[in-house]
Every structure is written in structure tokens, then in C-alpha cells.
Amino acid sequence: MSVDYGLAGKVAIVTGGSVGIGKETARQLARQGAKVVIAARTREALETAAEALRLETGGEVVAVPVDTTQRTSVENLVSETARRFGGVHILVNCAAAPGGLVRNEIEKADEDGLIADLNTKLVGYFRMCKACVPHMRQAGWGRIVNVGGLTARSTEALSGMRNAALVHLTKTLSDQLGVDGITVNIVHPGVTRTEHIEAWFADMARAEGTSVDAIVKREAADPAAIRRMLEADEVANAIVFLASSLASGLTGESIAVDGGLSRAVFL
């Protein structure tokens, strides 16, 4: 039996939508009848992804390039979406800096890389929310889902500071916007099979002279309660639920979709 998520006709923006979790989220939103704008830096990859999603889902999926470190670029994305589809109801923030997490110890950590990461993900998410909220308020309905990471809850990487800050942003906005019918939540994916993770694991395998399967087992499968790596659709399932009418009573929540990778107890 199919479940009606109440998304038919809703307008969604997914940043980081050309690959990985963002692309899978866009796919599922389109299947639910939402009109989807995917956004990322690289136009060619974005157009290719949008065409593939249109063919696969039969839905309305369009590509609009964006650099979330630039306010004017963000404002152009949101205004173009509203012009094309008449508003914005759903925002999934999934953009990430090209360099990825800053993982090195403090003496070797790259300040420019850290600033780029914070500007893309933390301040970039803030810019996207700021631009989308007026449209959601006008509609009297909105969903914001931020995609963070488990480093919000661990000391694995210095870049975890941006995920911890995203939790604060999420909770603060949920308090501000609940009265307008807008919910705001954050999802922390565990180790998920995406293009980025597969390339990273391949690099680790080459450096260590071992197989990718051995790296996956050590880094993702053995530490997780489900004893395997997560797939992108499993994370997207949670995001799309939070973006739906079914999740109307959930806001301000910080949810790990990690296959039981983290062991902390939250009350």
C-alpha cells in the first residue's frame, strides 16, 4: 500500500541535489508529486542529474545552479524557483564544501578549508533559510530539513563544529517559525554509500594497500548495529518524511539516520 505524503503540488528546493543524498531526496520528492528544483555549483552535473530524474520519475525537476557562499546566488535560486512555480514550500539543505570535512589535528588543520566549510554549510544553510522563509510564511506551510552529520555528536573532525551549530540553528528556527506552520528539523546521516564516500574509501584502500571492502567493513559495517553501510535512499526516506504533511508534529528535532553507528543515549 502506497502512503500519501501530501506533497503533490508542493514546491521543493534541494541544495546539493546533483549527487548522493541530495539527488536521492529529489528523486523521492518528485515521485511524491512535488515540483523539485535541484541546486549545486556545477551546471553540467546539475543538468545531467535533473534530466535523469525527470526521465525516471516523470516529475517536474529543474536545475538552477547556486553557490551557497554567495547571498546573491542564493537569492537568485529562490526567486527563480518562486517565479517558475509560484512559491517555495520545502527546503532541503544538503550542500557541502568541495573539500569536505577538516579532519586533521589542530597543527595541520587548514584554516581556509574550515572557513569554506562553515561558509558553505552553516552560513549557507542560514542564507537559504532566510531567503525561503518569506515564501513559506506567505503559504502558511513549510518544511525545512537540514542535513548535518554525526560529527555534531563526536570529536572525529574539527568540521563537526558546523554540524553542532546547525543543530542550534535548527532548534532556534523551529521556535521562531512554528507559529507560521513551518517545521524545522535536522538529519545526521551515518556512513552512507555516496559518490564522495566511495571515492574516499577507495583512496584509503590504496593508501593502506587493502581492499575497499575491507575499508567498508572497518569504517561502516562492523561499527553499526545493522552491520552494513547505509544506502542513500535510507537517509532520503527520513528526509522526505520530515518534509511531508505526515510529520506535522515534529519540529526542532535532531535525528541520526546512522544504522546504529552512534552509541550515545539521548533522553
Image (tube, rainbow, N blue to C red):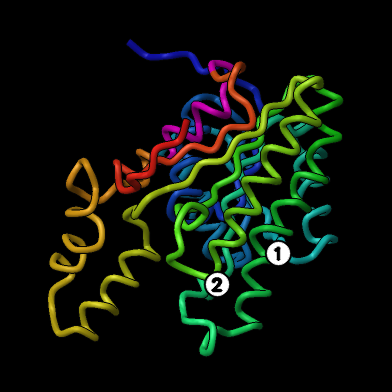
Any part of residue 7 in sight? no
Whether residue 111 is situated above or below residue 87 in the rendered picture: below
Q: Quickly name the residue at label 2.
A: 98
Q: Nearer the viewer, residue 226 or 161?
A: 161
In-image side of 116 versus 48 (left or right): right
In-image side of 17 versus 215 (left or right): right
Q: Which labelled disc corresponds to residue 236?
A: none
Secondary structure under tag 2 reads loop
Position in image of residue 203 (x %, y %): 29, 79
In-image side of 239 versus 112 (left or right): left
Secondary structure under tag 1 reads loop
In the rendered image, which quarter contains the N terminus? top left
Q: Residue furthest top?
A: 1
Name the kind of residue labelled 1 in the image. Asp
Q: Which residues are magenta?
A: 235-246
Q: Nearer the viewer, residue 238 or 1?
A: 238
Mark 2, Cα crowd under 10 Å, few <14 / some 14-19 / many 20+, is few
Q: Quickly name the residue at label 1.
A: 67
7 magenta-colored: no
Position in image of residue 258 (x %, y %): 35, 44
Query: Quarter-wise, where is residue 210 in the image?
Result: bottom left
Name the kind of residue labelled 2 in the image. Pro
Whether residue 3 is situated above or below residue 214 in the rendered picture: above
Position in image of residue 177 (x %, y %): 79, 28
Q: Image point 32% across, 55% down: which residue?
A: 193
Whether residue 149 is situated above or below residue 264 in the rendered picture: below
Position in image of residue 26 (x %, y %): 51, 41
